[in-house]
Image (tube, rainbow, N blue to C red):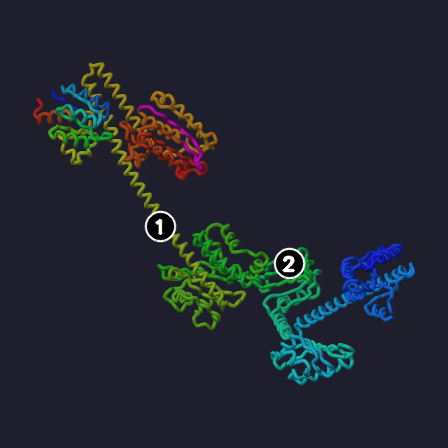
Amino acid sequence: MAGTVGSLPRVLVVEPAPELLQEQRDQLGREGFIAEGESDPAKALERIKLEPFDLLLTARDFPGPMSGVQLCRDLKSQPQLAWIPVMFVAGDVSAGSVEQLFEAGADEFVSRPCPPGELAVRAKVLVRKGHEERWLVERARKLAEKIAERDDELDDLRRFAQDIVSALPSALLVLDAAGTILFANAPFLSLLGAGRGEVVGRKLSDFFSSDSLTTGLNRAIDGAVNNGQPSWLRRIAHFMKARDGMIADLTIAPIEYAGVRQVLLVIEDVTDRARAETTLELERSKLNNVVNAMNAALCLIGRDRKIVWTNRTFDLWFGDSFGQPGFSAFLSNMSRNESWVEPVFTKGQIQHVAWSVYTSQGQRRFFANIVAPIRTEAGRPAEQALILTQDVTEQETRVEQLSLLRELSQYLQQTLDVGRLNHVILLCVTAGYALGFNRAFLFKRNRQKNILEAEAAVGPTSREEAFRIWADLSSQARTLSDLVREIESKGPGAPASPLFNQIQHVQYNLDDPSEIIVRTALEKKSQVVTGADRDPRISEHFRRTFGAQEFVSVPLIVKNTVVGVLLTDNLYSGRPITDDHVKLMTLFAAQAALAIENADTYAELQMRMAELHHAQDQIVHSEKLAAVGKMAAYVAHEIRNPLATIGGFARAVLKRPDNVERVAKNAKIIAEESTRLENLLKGVMDFSRPNAPVLKSADLNALVERIFRNHTERLAHLHIHGDLDLDRSLPEVVFDQNQIQQVLDNLVRNAADSMRNGGALRMKTAREGDWVLVAVTDTGSGIPEDVRDRIFSPFMTTKPDGTGLGLAVVKKILDDHGGKIDFTSQVGSGTTFSMHLPIHRAPPPIAAAVAQVQKA
Amino acid sequence: MAKLLVVDDDKNLRLLYEQELSDEGHQITLADSGPAALDYLKGQRPDLVILDISMPGMDGIEALGKILAKDKSMPVILNTAYSTYKDNFMTWSADAYVVKSGDLTELKAKIREVLKSRGLGN
């Protein structure tokens, strides 16, 4: 930007004559100007373009091709510089030529020579004028810029508005008062499937096929135009090309443009919404029907426990019971407390609760309830609670029936007492609500006699007793297992049953198919009778004996063979027997039949067992005889040697009584042999004597230690190293001191005998589970493999002077103690005998039996 | 006088036979088991073997078989506490079968008889 503001004005003086140039610069300089000089106008123009000047002072004529007028004209032709005032200073200028100067754009002319102050005064005036002009020019330029900006903004706004209008999903129209379309947006065009050119200028009614719509629309447009009245219509519109039956919302609003009333018409396609609304309405009414018709009671309660709403099922089920006082009253009528509702309100938890109620007819009904909080706003405590109550009696009954069968089959696995089993089977049929018959009778088939005979019966004998039982049942719900436990507490066999006493002699010949019980067995099919009096299948005898009009008779079949018949009725309650009951009974009968068969088999098995026991006793007896024979042979042999020796030497003595030395020698041998005979006798006695152990709780370690000490000296003599390893934590054990000592003595002696050349013997005690162990280990010759399976047999020995009874006695003693004896052995490296005694146990059966015999 | 081998596992019975048969004028050798007897017979030939049957390890019947396998002509008297062994046909191959007794008369008689039948008796 040329020119200066606020500082000294700058003037460019253009004058070819140097002295004149200097004089003018001086004059101006004295008056507060910064006066620059230039002699060539072309150069002056260049300088003005580059430097800021507030005023140009120029001569008219110059020696060069460019004149002062030309300079002025060039300057004024530059828009940026035109404001710089130009003052000509010239002498000898005619009026016409002054005119020419102003035409070229000069602002002032001063003729030379001029009075000294004149130039500066004029110059100052010009500078001020110039500044004013420059400000105006500047201002005009800025205004022009602003206007241009506004134009841009307006363009943007227009585009913006156009974008909005075209982006609207609604069809938009502007109409004039006569209904001619002035403007239509893209959605409207696409609605019609027409170009803008085909729409603008046409009447709106051209595009609707419905007269009623056109009429209504015209009225609305009139209202808008004449009264400025907006209106709203919903119509099913039939556009020429749009989808038929479109449901449209039409909004008609008066607008004013450039002082003219026009109408804005907005067409919205609400087909989907309208249909959704209709569907929703439909659904809602359906839901209402469902809620009312559903087989669950619904009830809405407030925080104050007042019932707010119920469905029809609730009313049907609980009817008057709730009424005005509210939910608590309802619950108390149902003998329930409402503590389970509390968490729904306090914690917003969904609650599940089930209860059962006995109806006045003795029927038990089960209800399962779900209580859910109802909130009006998320995060806030529940305002209400919805209680959904389902009658699950059916399911519960099924569950009960299943668990009945399960419980029964479990029980049947446990019990083999035929009498009690029969009773339990009938209990299953009568107790509980699974089958819940009033009475049940069991007939069993007697194969020998070919009859069905009454075996058991359960149920009341009179109406009074029946009602008493029901009252009991409803006050204390007892499960089958409770009842079974009760029976068991009364001891073995079937409990007394007055009902059974009434029919215990009833029996039916299996050859007589006229009896329904027999028919059931023969046909292997359940028989349901609903009117005994009119039913030809029913004999007079049966009618008199049982008296029920309605009953079911079910065969008990195992492996396609009838083992009995189950007869049940509802004599007292008169409850009809349903197909369900019969089905379940059949299912149940299969189980029961199996159980009866099991028990019978078991009973037979027991009988067979007794026979077997008897046979076994006989075998044992004959085995004993065999053993006696074997023992006799053994004894004969064992005795024959010493006897022969004794006899031989005795005869030798008799023959030569004088040979004192020989007599002494022979007598010594005789004595030895008689000792041998005594030992033999002792062994035989030990084995054969029925010596019951005298059982006392004692310290086994002490005994083992004592035996070990007893043998120490002898062992040392035989070059056997003894070693004792006692488990000090050993519990006290019940055993016979003398007998166990005999066992251990035997084991130690055997061990020593196997170590003819010395070795090591170790005695050890330890606890092993429920047993205590005493082990005797040697490093001897070991037990030859071929005799290992016989070492505990009597009369079996590998020793030249053995009786063959030592280990047999050991085995017998441990058997009597309920203990065990076994061994491991390695030929050439040694043997370990392990003796086990039980820690906790009842006295061994033999010992107990013997003790009993002895007491007797 | 004959050379007799007495085989018995019973020590005192051996002593008895040694004493009594020596008195008869025989020369007695004792063996306490079948293997010991067979061992002796490897180097010696007695005139008669008196063999016990019931012995631990190798019994008299087994020993008899082995003795006869080596020398079929060896005279053997079986001397046992059991009479039952008489039924065992193996015992038939022995020259005599004598049941043990305090009275050695029968044994002595059988010894004489066997020795005589073999041309050794007097």
Residue A184 location, x and y as percent?
A: 68, 77
From this view, report whether residue A260 is shown above or below residue A676. below
**Mark 1 falls on what kind of element?**
helix
Q: Name the residue under label 2.
A: A336
Residue A29 location, x and y as percent?
A: 87, 55
The type of residue carrying mark 1 is Arg
Q: How crowded is mark 2: few (under 14 residues within 10 Å), some or many (20 or more)?
A: some
Write down the region rendered in magenta: A757-774
**Furthest-bottom residue in view?**
A211
Q: Does the magenta stretch include residue A219?
A: no
Please name which of the two marks, 2 or 1, marks the residue nearer to the observer: 2
Picture quadrant of residue B113: top left
Q: Is residue A492 visible?
A: yes
- Viewed as shown, does residue A342 lie left or right of A699? right
Q: Which of A142 and B73 is in front in this view?
A: A142
Circle number at residue A608? 1
**Mark 2 falls on what kind of element?**
loop
Quadrant showing the N terminus of chain B: top left
Residue at x-position 65% and y-position 63%: A386
From this view, report whether residue A761 is shown above or below residue A11. above
Q: Is residue A760 magenta?
A: yes
Q: Which of A218 and A365 is in front in this view?
A: A218
Picture quadrant of residue A564: bottom left
Q: Is residue A285 visible?
A: no
Task: Name the chain under label 1.
Answer: A
Quadrant showing the C terminus of chain B: top left
* Mark toward the start of the polypeptide (2 vs 1): 2
Residue A492 location, x and y as percent?
A: 46, 50
Picture quadrant of residue A26: bottom right
The type of residue carrying mark 2 is Arg
Magenta segment, prevailing SS (helix, strand or loop): strand
